[in-house]
Each structure stands twice: as structure tokens, then as C-alpha cells.
Amino acid sequence: MISLTDTQKIGMGLTGFGVFFLFFGMILFFDKALLAIGNVLFVAGLAFVIGLERTFRFFFQKHKMKATGFFLGGVFVVLVGWPLIGMIFEIYGFFLLFRGFFPVVVGFIRRVPVLGSILNLPGIRSTT
């Protein structure tokens, strides 16, 4: 089992609440207040989990500047008051930023008992 420091545990909670608020904000027809809270909690949680310096290094790498621009620009657009356009920018930036992590996440989910059996079905296994 992976041992987490107290700061990382707080970061996991903040990130989880951020994802919850983002999801809930999208369900409630892109409520800008919930989306703004979700954005702030997600970014703060990420900083708590991996550390402030590593967060800055992750977002501001030379080859990730386009992705960072879309993600943080989307956060700004949501905060200004255009939640649908902002979320489109954020989702595009999120996929550009974290596309290297998706194979790792799929590999991890394959080891989870119920989800792993679903991902190992013949039709799904070939696409992931």
C-alpha cells in the first residue's frame, strides 16, 4: 500500500471534491459557481498532492505550454462567467496535459476487481 503524508491526504480530498464539484456543476447545466469552486479545489488539490514546485514544473514545461494555456484559460473563462466555453477549453487542455497518464490509469483500473473484468472484455480490451 502506498503511504501518503497528511498533506497528500488533504490534496487527495481537495482533488476529489474538485472533481465532484466540476461534475455536479456540469450536471446542473454548467452552473458557473460550482464549476469555479471545482476548478479551484482541483488545482489546489493537485498542488497539495505533488507539491507546489512540481506543480509549477508540470504545468509550465515548454512542450505543455499550449495545454496549460487552454486549461488555465478555461478556468479563467469559467470564472469570468462563460462556463460552457470555459469547460470546452478546460477539457481540451486537460486531455493535452494528462494524456501521458491515461495508459497508467487504464492499467490501474484493470487491476480493480469489477472494473478490471469489464475492461478485459474482448471488444473493450482492443480499444484501451
Image (cartoon, rainbow, N blue to C red):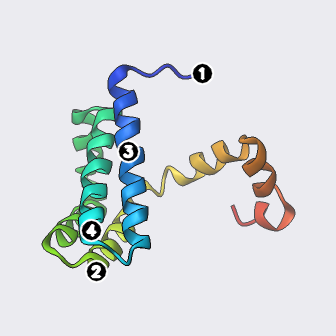
**Label 3 vs 4, first from the N-terminus:** 3
User: Callout 2, which amino acid?
Assistant: Ile
Residue where numbered disc 1 is placed: 1
**Label 2 vs 1, first from the N-terminus:** 1
Q: Residues within 10 Å of mark 2 (few under 14, many from 20)?
A: few
Q: Mark 4 or mark 2: which is in front?
A: 2
- Identify the image quadrant of the C terminus: bottom right
User: Callout 3, which amino acid?
Assistant: Thr
Q: Which mark is residue 104?
A: none
Q: Are marks 3 and 4 in contact (CB under 8 Å)?
A: no
* Image position of 73 with respect to 50: above or below: below
Instruction: Give left or right: position of 102 versus 54.
Output: right
Query: What secondary structure is marked by label 4?
Result: helix
In the foreground, 11 or 89: 11
Q: Which corner quadrant of the image does residue 65 belong to?
A: bottom left
Query: What secondary structure is marked by label 3?
Result: helix
Q: Residues within 10 Å of mark 1 (few under 14, many from 20)?
A: few
Cα gap from disc 3 to disc 1, whole angstroms: 20 Å
User: Callout 1, which amino acid?
Assistant: Met
Residue where numbered disc 3 is placed: 15
Q: Are marks 3 and 1 in contact (CB under 8 Å)?
A: no
Query: What secondary structure is marked by label 2?
Result: helix
Residue where numbered disc 2 is placed: 85
**Label 4 vs 2, first from the N-terminus:** 4
Cα gap from disc 2 to disc 3, whole angstroms: 22 Å
Q: Are marks 2 and 1 in contact (CB under 8 Å)?
A: no
